[in-house]
């Protein structure tokens, strides 16, 4: 705490814990606004109405998320749907699998350009991504390896902001230039994150240092695995599973927190590097990009406290304790079960479940996958029985993504950066759409609850 702030907290700096807590509560009260005032003034907290529906603040052609439909005049929960530029996510994933291709580049082209590429267009786009898989001279040494951090998202944010110094047209917001910057950042993100992890792992964890350059002939998922692993080896199934995860995390409507941040900062006229750095800061929060880490922590806690995880009754009893705030982190949440939008199902979770099951079987982890299935089934059953969730509840993508990354031997510090490597495509697409369609700064309104006060002279306070 700085010297300037100490006087304001001098009553808190005491060994009397009860007194200190009282003073802290008084300080908190200077910021507190009574909850009933939000309803009284019809304020949509968190940009959501009383039913949890997002307040409409814009239009988009980039993706569509559907969780309910109007059937005979009645809004009814439905099987979750996700489409990119109008193409159903199941069709996109199955189309790629049917041709035995890696799809990251094809689907990122779709989001950025608005149409599926021809073979020639895809070849040229892959070449553009490949050419831009390089960082400025000495950037790894001078930027990434300086002051390494366990928080790889912070390291990535610093690197993105620093990249602006190497771009003579950093502040040029013309569509052509922003698209060029977008492709460069998409290509660079794996290096920014993986190299930041290796720097942390070496300097902070005292492990061996190795920096593998990307292979320009390989796909995005293949390069991530080859750069991350000491021997650069991986199986085709591993690379395809990661490719699917990247596609599924690439975009999810304009209303998620980091994408909305992208829109807001873009509306101010800021440069691409500032916009993407802001989105990274938003994504790193545990309520957004870090959710799958909480799933992994919960599963570790279950294994540590349930004597026989195959005993369905014992497992259900422990999940009840979690739900009743008696176990794990005492929040009452079964992580990975439930979603802000989806009601009956999350299509991303359904697709990723299949890849996770196949990879778990290949690695001899069928029992662990079975535990995940049991937790999902019993968690859903308990929540449906004990919580009044009118829209329905389902397993979400975070429930499986952390387990998938664990099977791939991806360190937990890289879970959210992997998300960022995918979502940067969606951010860039939304930035471009915002630039094309909006010329005004986003400026939501806040109603002031402050009470007028008379000024008191300093020597009379």
Image (spheres, helix red, strand yellow):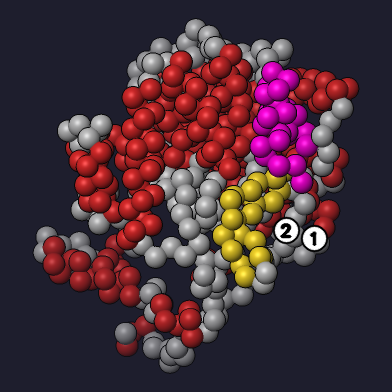
Secondary structure mostly seen in magenta is: helix
Asked if 153 appears above or below 317 in the picture, the reply is above
Q: Which residue is mark 1?
A: 438
Q: Residue at x 61, y 17 (%)?
A: 222
Q: Quadrant of residue 121 in the image?
A: top right
Q: Quadrant of the N terminus?
A: bottom left
Q: Is residue 104 magenta?
A: yes
- Left or right of 314? Residue 145 is right
Q: Whole-percent x and y of residue 99?
A: 73, 20
Q: Which residue is mark 2?
A: 267
Near-viewer residue (72 or 140) = 72
- Left or right of 26? Residue 360 is right
Q: Quadrant of the C terminus?
A: bottom left
Q: Whole-percent x and y of residue 417?
A: 52, 34
The local secondary structure at tag 1 comes to loop
- Frontmost of labels 2 and 1 is 1
Query: In this view, which residue lies farthest toward the left?
Result: 16
Q: Which residues are magenta?
A: 86-110
Q: Is residue 77 magenta?
A: no
Q: Quadrant of residue 206 in the image?
A: top left
- Left or right of 223? Residue 202 is left
Q: Residue at x 46, y 90 (%)?
A: 452
């Amino acid at each position: 705490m700085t010297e300037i702030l100490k006087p304001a907290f001098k009553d808190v700096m005491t060994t009397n814990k009860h007194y200190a807590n009282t003073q802290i509560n008084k300080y908190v009260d200077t910021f507190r606004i009574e909850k009933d005032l939000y309803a009284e003034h019809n304020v949509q907290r968190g940009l959501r109405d009383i039913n949890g529906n997002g307040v409409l603040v814009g239009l988009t052609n980039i993706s569509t998320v559907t969780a309910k439909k109007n059937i005979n005049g009645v809004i009814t929960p439905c099987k979750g749907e996700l489409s990119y530029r109008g193409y159903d996510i199941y069709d996109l994933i199955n189309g790629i699998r049917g041709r035995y291709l890696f799809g990251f580049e094809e689907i990122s082209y779709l989001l950025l350009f608005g149409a599926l590429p021809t073979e020639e267009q895809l070849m040229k786009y892959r070449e553009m991504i490949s050419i831009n898989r390089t960082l400025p001279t000495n950037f790894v040494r001078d930027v990434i390896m300086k002051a390494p951090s366990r928080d790889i998202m912070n390291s990535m944010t610093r690197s993105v902001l620093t990249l602006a110094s190497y771009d003579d047209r950093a502040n040029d917001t013309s569509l052509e230039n922003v698209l060029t910057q977008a492709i460069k950042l998409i290509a660079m993100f794996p290096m920014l994150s993986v190299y930041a992890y290796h720097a942390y792992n070496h300097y902070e964890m005292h492990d061996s240092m190795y920096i593998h350059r990307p292979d320009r002939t390989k796909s995005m998922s293949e390069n991530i695995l080859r750069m991350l692993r000491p021997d650069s080896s991986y199986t085709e199934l591993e690379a395809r599973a990661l490719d699917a995860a990247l596609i599924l995390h690439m975009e999810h409507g304009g209303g998620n927190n980091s994408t909305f941040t992208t829109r807001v900062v873009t509306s101010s006229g800021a440069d691409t590097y500032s916009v993407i750095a802001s989105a990274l800061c938003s994504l790193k929060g545990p309520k957004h990009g870090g959710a799958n880490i909480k799933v992994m922590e919960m599963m570790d806690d279950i294994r540590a406290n349930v004597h026989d995880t195959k005993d369905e009754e014992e497992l259900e009893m422990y999940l009840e304790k979690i739900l009743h705030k008696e176990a794990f982190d005492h929040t009452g949440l079964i992580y990975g079960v439930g979603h802000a939008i989806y009601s009956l199902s999350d299509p991303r979770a359904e697709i990723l479940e299949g890849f996770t099951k196949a990879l778990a079987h290949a690695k001899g982890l069928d029992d662990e996958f079975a535990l995940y299935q049991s937790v999902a089934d019993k968690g859903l059953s308990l929540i449906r029985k004990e919580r009044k969730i009118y829209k329905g509840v389902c397993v979400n993508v975070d429930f499986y993504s952390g387990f998938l990354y664990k099977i791939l031997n991806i360190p937990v510090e890289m879970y959210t950066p992997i998300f960022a490597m995918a979502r940067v495509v969606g951010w860039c697409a939304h930035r471009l759409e915002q630039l094309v369609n909006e010329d005004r700064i986003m400026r939501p309104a806040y109603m002031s609850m402050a009470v007028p006060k008379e000024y008191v002279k300093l020597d009379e306070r």
